[in-house]
Amino acid sequence: MKPLAFRTFCTLIFALLFLSTKADDNYNRDEIQPRLEAMECIVKPRYTTAVENYIKGYFARGGMKAQRILARTVLYFPIFEKQLAERGMPDDLKYLAVVESGLNPMAVSRVGATGLWQFMKETGAGFGLKINSKIDERSCPVRSTEAALEYLSRAYQRFGSWELAIASYNCGAGNVRRAMRRAGGSNDYWKISKYLPRETRNFVPAFLGAAYMVKYHHLHGVAPEYPDFDLQVTEGQLIYQEMKFETIAAVAKVPVHVVEKLNPAYKKGYVPANSKGHWVVLPRRVMQALRDYTILLRPDNGPTIELPPLPELMGRADYFPDSYYFKTFYKALGGDSLHKLGEIFSCSGHNLKIWNGLHSDEVEKGQELIVWFPKELLRYQPFKESVEALPPVSRSAKEAGVSRPAAPKMNAVQTLNLHPFQVNGHPSLAATAYLLASGNPLLAKKQKFSLRRSFDKIKYRAGEKQFFKKKKKKG
């Protein structure tokens, strides 16, 4: 062996040994095992060598793999959590997508399984996913999640166990039934696992490793960098007309790469026409503009309306997504939960958890939470203009002493202190209180809040608190 080659070989061996030792140094089994065994999860936690190896894999090399996956949770967990709640299914099932794809909607396995939930082509088509030269709904976060949860729901009805439903997701119901028969009819995953295909034997341990990583990453010094607010606070809308990504971007006044990032299912850079509609996901603050535009394109919208010219496409250099949001503070009441507060604030419980650096879903009475809102909701001409942006404040979030994992990149962020307030659909709150910026009209809030008095021509002085009580029904 030549000296240079030998030195290179020795360097590689040393690096591998160093990284392995570093990973082992950061792994304390005496702390992790009892923590995992006490973890609340739909899968009965059991500490095994396989589970240990999966956990080590997430936190090796400074937790690079964990950081990458955790940064994606803010894009996809809200979609999973919403659909799981609507179906009455356990929230923990979202960790299955971490195991399957690492939360990468473009992931493709060596056998052709594709998307967040890794559907094979035949299986995906069997659950109603469109797969052709223009669109692959296995990569659509909304549609693929619908299909995956339908599969898991049927599997649970068949086996009566979420552990076995998860196992069948990997190897099929037939293999699970055969393993149960060989184990004497048991439906305990850990008893039948030795009769399952080799890959599936590690599937539930992988699920436990993923659940542990998401729940306890902060105890391993992992602090992910989350994406811009425009990618965090999103909304889906069915559209029926063919529409290019450039058109959507121009209407929504966002760069094309934002449309591409949020809509990975479309292969050709446009949304195909379809009588049943295709999902388009955009930042929530601009979705109404797209709705306005699609109304103008409908054939049944009455008199012909001349379409105004599309705005010029926005480039990356002119795009400052975090400057489009302002910060509020909410003081929690008894009985609040992150999930319900997310519904109230038009975000998700996962958003609130990230914005406040929380590591559980529990909210204590009196706890102050940071909530981020769009400064304006974009409309498309000839509809009425966008809601006017709130005036800027004189100090940045940093000067205000606010610390959060996903700190904004821009300082021009409006801070508005919100105390407990009444929002549509929140019956437990009796009054509202605002600490308002100077000269801030509440015209934009009129449609959002159910209040007793009109405040159409009212402006408030800086620092003045206004209380509004919910109108009681007669009788």
Image (cartoon, helix red, strand yellow):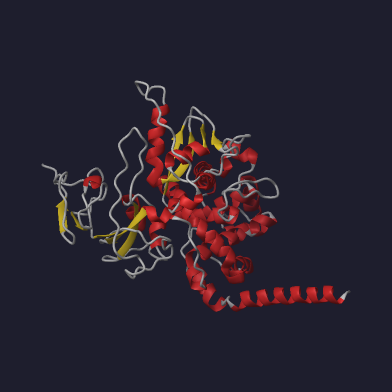
Q: Is residue 466 above or below residue 125?
A: below
Residue 387, image x, y percentages: 30, 44
Q: Residue furthest top?
A: 303
Q: How many marks?
A: 0
When asked about the image quadrant of residue 381, the answer is top left
Residue 181, image x, y percentages: 64, 51
438 vs 173, left or right, is: left
- Evaluate whether residue 462 shows in this view: yes
- In depth, the one of 407 and 274 nearer the eye is 407
Q: Is residue 297 above or below residue 443?
A: above
Residue 238, image x, y percentages: 45, 35
If the image is split into quadrants, where does the C terminus sit? top left
467 vs 233, left or right, is: left
- Evaluate whether residue 44 shows in this view: no
148 vs 352, left or right, is: right
Residue depicted at 56% across the width and 58% down the height: 188
Q: Is residue 52 above or below residue 462?
A: below
Residue depicted at 75% across the width and 73% down the height: 12
When asked about the image quadrant of residue 21, the answer is bottom right
Q: Residue furthest left?
A: 475
If the image is split into quadrants, where does the N terminus sit? bottom right
Residue depicted at 38% across the width and 46% down the height: 285
Residue 256, image x, y percentages: 51, 44
320 vs 441, left or right, is: right
- In depth, the one of 42 and 351 nearer the eye is 351
Residue depicted at 56% across the width and 66% down the height: 46
